[in-house]
Structure formats: C-alpha cells, structure tokens
Amino acid sequence: RLHFRDLKPQPSGSVIMGGRYFASVAMAAGLTASAVSPAAAHPHEFVTMKIQVAFDKAGRMVGMRYNWTFDEFFSAYAVEPFDENGNQQVEQEESDALLADVIKNITPIDYFTKFDQNGAMPELDQAIPVTSSFENRQVTLVFDVPFNKPIDVSDKPLRYAIYDDEFYIAMNHVEGDQAVMLAGTTDGCSSDINGADPSEELEAFALSLDKTDQAPMDLGAAFAEWVTIKCS
C-alpha cells in the first residue's frame, strides 16, 4: 500500500513553486504557472518536521519550536528569489530572508497548526525566527511560536496536528526520538504520535489531483499526524 510519507516530488519541465502560503517567493522569482507533468499529484511539496515543546519551571507548556526541512525541488525555487548578489550560493542572510518571508505568509493560518478543541487550547503568539540553513540541497527553517498564556496539560492533554488543509503540502514528523522533544519538562510528561490512516480510495483520489485542481478543504486532515502532549 502506498504511504504519502514515502513519496518523493517529481520534477517537471516547468514547476510553479509553492502552495498558497509559500507563493510570494515564487512571485519574487518571476515564476508563473505553466505546463506540469501529467504525473503530477497531491501533494506537491514535502516537509519533514521536528517539534520541540517548551515547558516553564512550573511544568506548563509555554510554546513550540518548529524545525521544518523542505524537499529539494521546493528548496531550489524557494531560495532563488533571495539570491540578491546573483552568485548562485545560498548565504546566511538569504536563507534568513526566506525564513522571515515564510513566517509572514503562514502567520494568518497559525503556522498550519490545529488543536483538538476537546483538549487544552493555547493562543498562539507571533512566531520568532531562530535559524535557517541550506544543506544537502534542502532548506531547513526553524522558528519559535510562544503561547500567549502557559498551558497546564496535567489536567487536560494538548493535541495538535500540523497540516495543509488542501494537502498541497505533505507535512510529516521525522521518524525516531527527534520527532517531538519535550524541553524543560519534569518527569511524568510524554508525547505520543498517532499516524494517519487514510483509505486507499482517498489516497488514490489525492494522487489523481493535478497542481491546478482544487482539492477539498478537508483533504489534508485525512493525512494528518496528531500528537498528544500530557503530564501526570
């Protein structure tokens, strides 16, 4: 059975860069929509994530650090508009400019983050850029998102998912212990990732969608990984 986290983006003769929320960097590069490969399918961009959950000394959640690594094809087009000196090298100030641009674009949608309304519900503050890099032909962007108020997850756990509603972008946690890390917490706190299990029919439907097709706004939810943070 096909699993989307195992897919790799396929190049085409001409690629329009970015989903709705990363599109401004494509505009800056002068890229426009054009013919795409008939094999194109949702998703079109791939992000692997490491999340660090921050706790204060009282054991309350105070924010999250997002560490996103983008696929090679998105990375190539994303950095191009920021190569101001034209040397075709990604310098620190250029990748930092990309980080600032991405944060600006995804702030209105809460950084693709959804919370289970039956659990603890934080209010997200403005993201703070941390660092950016370009290694092995991939962009990695790191930023902090503080909570407006600390959240006590000992009474009610917090559940979050990070996904694009239309599944233009596939967003998955990395495998292993670095997927979700708890920083500053005391013993008794834990995280648990529940992977997505979409039907074969839904996976086939997503694969059938071209870049220009309008996906249902809830398609991404079917492929989302939900994470539970709780303390005893």
Image: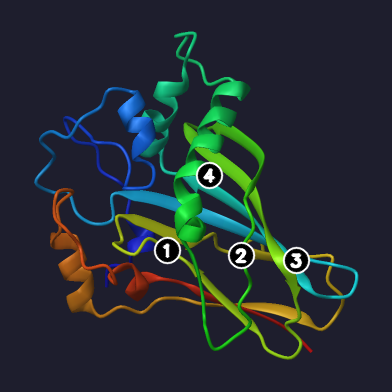
N-terminal label among 4 and 1: 4
Secondary structure beneath dot 3 equals: strand
Q: Which residue is mark 2?
A: 176
Residue 224 is situated, as x and y percent measured from the top left of the image, at 41, 71
Residue drawn at (19%, 35%), measured in percent from left and top?
A: 12
Q: Which label is found at residue 163?
A: 1
N-terminal label among 2 and 3: 3
Residue toward you, 163 or 188: 163
Q: Nearer the viewer, mark 3 or mark 1?
A: 3
Could one spot residue 35 in this view of the protein?
yes
Could one spot residue 73 in this view of the protein?
no
Residue toward you, 166 or 74: 166
Q: Are marks 1 and 2 in contact (CB under 8 Å)?
A: no
- Quarter occupied by the N terminus: bottom left
Residue toward you, 130 or 173: 130
Residue 113 is situated, as x and y percent measured from the top left of the image, at 50, 64
Q: Nearer the viewer, mark 2 or mark 4?
A: 4
N-terminal label among 3 and 1: 3
Q: Which residue is mark 3?
A: 62
Name which residue type carries label 1. Tyr
Disc 2 to disc 3, C-alpha distance: 24 Å
Residue toward you, 44 or 214: 214
- Quarter occupied by the C terminus: bottom right
Badge 4: few (under 14), some or many (20 or more) residues near its Cα, within 10 Å?
many
